[in-house]
Amino acid sequence: MVALKRSLKENPFRNKMELISRNRRIPFPRRPLIMGILNITDDSFSGDGRIDTGWALGRVREMVALGADLIDIGAESARTNREAILPEEERRRLIPVLEGFAPAVAGLVPRDAGQVFPPWLSVNTWRPEVAEPALEAGADLLNDMSALPDDRNARLCAKTGAALLIMHSMGEPKIPHTHVHHPDIMETLRVFFREKMALAMEAGVPREALVLDPGIDFAKQALDNLRIYHELDTLCEFERPILLPVSRKGVIGDTLGLENPTDRDAGTAACLVAGLRRGAAIFRVHNLEMAWHTIRSVDPLENPEAAWFGEGRPA
């Protein structure tokens, strides 16, 4: 109960730090960031994707208007019950959208004074042969779900100056790992992040360019996921932004008995609040309007002296 009642003013993530990419910097502490999910695929688990460049760029503009600080673009579903696509097909879907991103957001205005603007462009891929042209097309962040098995993607980020997201998982992507059991999931995460951060920095990625993702639902049991939510603040020891992929996750469906992912937005809001109270800095979501209002409500309610109080006013 002590952790649940802790004020956001005492949130361990209120340490001073920054996230850098290319020539841009996001200083912390600040209002948590919202990462909008854009799937250029027709087999997303949430059923919200489409293989259509024009539609995708229109969705980019909608996400900017809804307050997205980052937009995460992926061309392959992470679902393990779907066949992997070939790298050339992934590039065919991704690159036109990445190249059209800057023109698509040109002339738009931020939703409020607290929005990162223009939003950072994140590319969700794990294959180096896809990551390289994606980063050359201007992506600010590589969202790598491969758990960084080697330093190839880190070297690409070092070469281009892009930031790198390190997600915890086990084994090769697109293969189910639901059999994995962790004696102590939080210790597993601490060991993993120490090793992978060292690997990335040895490859030339600055510490300030790293983001950490505990990998909710990836190679974990339901109780592992719940414990991550409850003890997330222990990962603040790394003094790096923590991305929490809260949106419509399987653990929400398991907890609430909801099979359809689109029915899980209320549970997503609850997970978002739990993550906000325990140090998460970035939330990856499908429903941006829900996330924006949740963040804009919870933090000022608990911490009216926050530096970003009042940022809801139009810019």
Image: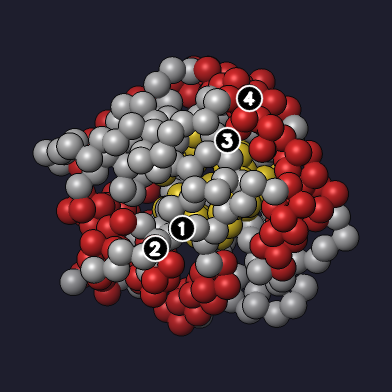
- Residue type beneath disc 3: Leu
Badges 2 and 1: C-beta atoms under 8 Å apart?
Answer: yes
Badges 2 and 4: C-beta atoms under 8 Å apart?
Answer: no
Q: Position of residue 131 (x, y in %)?
A: 61, 27
Q: Earlier in the sequence, mark 1 or mark 3?
A: 1
Q: Earlier in the sequence, mark 2 or mark 4?
A: 4
- Estimate the spatial distance between the alpha carbons at disc 1 and disc 3, rounded to whole Å: 22 Å
- Which SS class for mark 3? strand
Which residue reaches farthest left? 183
1 vs 3, front mark: 1
Q: Where is residue 275 in the image (x, y as percent from the top left)?
A: 37, 61
Q: Residues within 10 Å of mark 3 (few under 14, many from 20)?
A: many
- Of residues 134 and 309, the one drawn nearer to the viewer in this rendering: 134
Mark linked to residue 261:
2
Determine if residue 72 is in view: no
4 vs 3, front mark: 4
Mark linked to residue 88:
4
Q: Earlier in the sequence, mark 3 or mark 2?
A: 3
In the rendered structure, the answer to whether residue 74 lies left or right of residue 269 reads right
Q: Residue at x 75, y 66 (%)?
A: 110
Q: Position of residue 242 (x, y in %)?
A: 44, 48
Give the labeled residue for mark 1: 46
Quadrant of the snapshot with the N terminus: bottom left
- Estimate the spatial distance between the alpha carbons at disc 2 and disc 1, rounded to whole Å: 6 Å
